[in-house]
């Protein structure tokens, strides 16, 4: 086997339950950012007359916080389904690139199992899974699933609770709770830091997304930032 290829394995001296448990424990700090953000989403959804069950269905099937917030902002009565679907696809376009980076680690798995793992992928579990693979010299699918399942369960549970308690909670953004998610993601980016040279595509992605956000309405800034980061990473890569 080519030693330069990504390896799909559990590190030595570990068992499947211990890897799942290790992933679940690693996810605990991230949950602190998930809970207030989920409550905010659920509370906003309740203001559009969505029930707790409907919110759970939405967040359980589409595990992507940004696209769910976009859908709630666009929600009308009756809902503009095509507009909401288009915006969801646009905001979730980053998952194409994230899934591509995980593909080499999952290609040894049967297709249903690989698709199941990708279904539970989110920004945080993706970042933590890759960081763990780099640190331990191999990708642990069970660690990744331990992280992902904990985050997914927390997200669905607390968005539903937010929908139930929405009328009592009011606008949680006034307390700054919506910044918790951004703070968690900044910490994850710090863990992926590999030096100034590797961070240049991040800068191009950030600047492009900011310009599109300021100049073009809608969620095009997400796709623009993704493409800018991808192109700059290709052009900036060392030979």
Image (tube, rainbow, N blue to C red):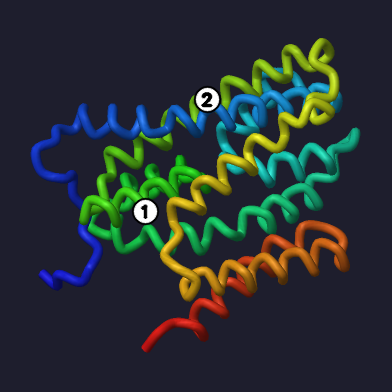
Q: Which residue is mark 1?
A: 130
Quadrant of the image occupied by residue 210: bottom right
Q: Is residue 118 left or right of residue 60?
A: left
Residue at image position (89%, 37%) is 76
Q: Is residue 153 above or below residue 141?
A: above
For label 2, the residue is 154
- Which element carries disc 2, helix, strand or loop? helix
Q: Name the residue: 73% across, 27% down.
A: 40
Q: Nearer the viewer, residue 99 or 114?
A: 99
Q: Quadrant of the C terminus?
A: bottom left
Q: Nearer the viewer, residue 195 or 59?
A: 195
Callout 2 environment at 10 Å: few (<14), some (14 to 19), or many (20+)?
Answer: some
Q: Residue at x 50, y 34 (%)?
A: 30
Mark in the foreground, 2 or 1: 1
Task: Report if the CB atoms under discs 2 and 1 are less than 8 Å apart.
Answer: no
How many neighbours does mark 1 have within 10 angstroms: few (below 14), some (14-19), or many (20 or more)?
some
Residue found at the far bottom of this picture: 239
Q: Give the percent coordinates (x, y) of residue 28.
A: 44, 27
Image: 235 above or below 1: below
Q: Position of residue 57 (x, y in %)?
A: 62, 28
Upstream in sequence: badge 2 or badge 1: 1
């Amino acid at each position: 086997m080519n030693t330069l290829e990504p390896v799909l394995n559990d590190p030595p001296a570990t068992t499947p339950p211990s890897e799942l448990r290790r992933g679940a424990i690693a996810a605990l700090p991230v949950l602190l950012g998930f809970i207030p953000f989920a409550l905010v989403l659920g509370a906003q959804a309740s203001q559009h007359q969505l029930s707790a069950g409907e919110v759970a269905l939405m967040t359980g099937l589409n595990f992507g916080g940004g696209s769910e917030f976009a859908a709630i902002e666009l929600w009308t009565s009756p809902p503009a389904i095509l507009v909401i679907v288009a915006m969801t696809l646009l905001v979730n376009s980053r998952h194409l690139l994230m899934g591509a980076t995980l593909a080499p680690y999952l290609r040894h798995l049967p297709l249903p199992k690989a698709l199941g793992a990708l279904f539970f992928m989110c920004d945080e579990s993706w970042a933590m899974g890759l960081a763990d693979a780099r640190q331990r010299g191999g990708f642990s699918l069970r660690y990744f699933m331990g992280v992902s399942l904990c985050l997914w369960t927390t997200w669905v549970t607390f968005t539903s609770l937010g929908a139930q308690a929405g009328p009592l909670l009011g606008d949680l953004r006034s307390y700054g709770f919506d910044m918790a998610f951004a703070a968690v993601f900044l910490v994850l980016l710090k863990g992926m830091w590999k030096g100034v040279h590797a961070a240049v595509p991040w800068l191009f992605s950030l600047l492009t997304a900011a310009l599109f956000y300021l100049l073009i309405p809608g969620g095009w800034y997400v796709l623009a930032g993704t493409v800018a980061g991808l192109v700059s990473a290709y052009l900036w890569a060392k030979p």
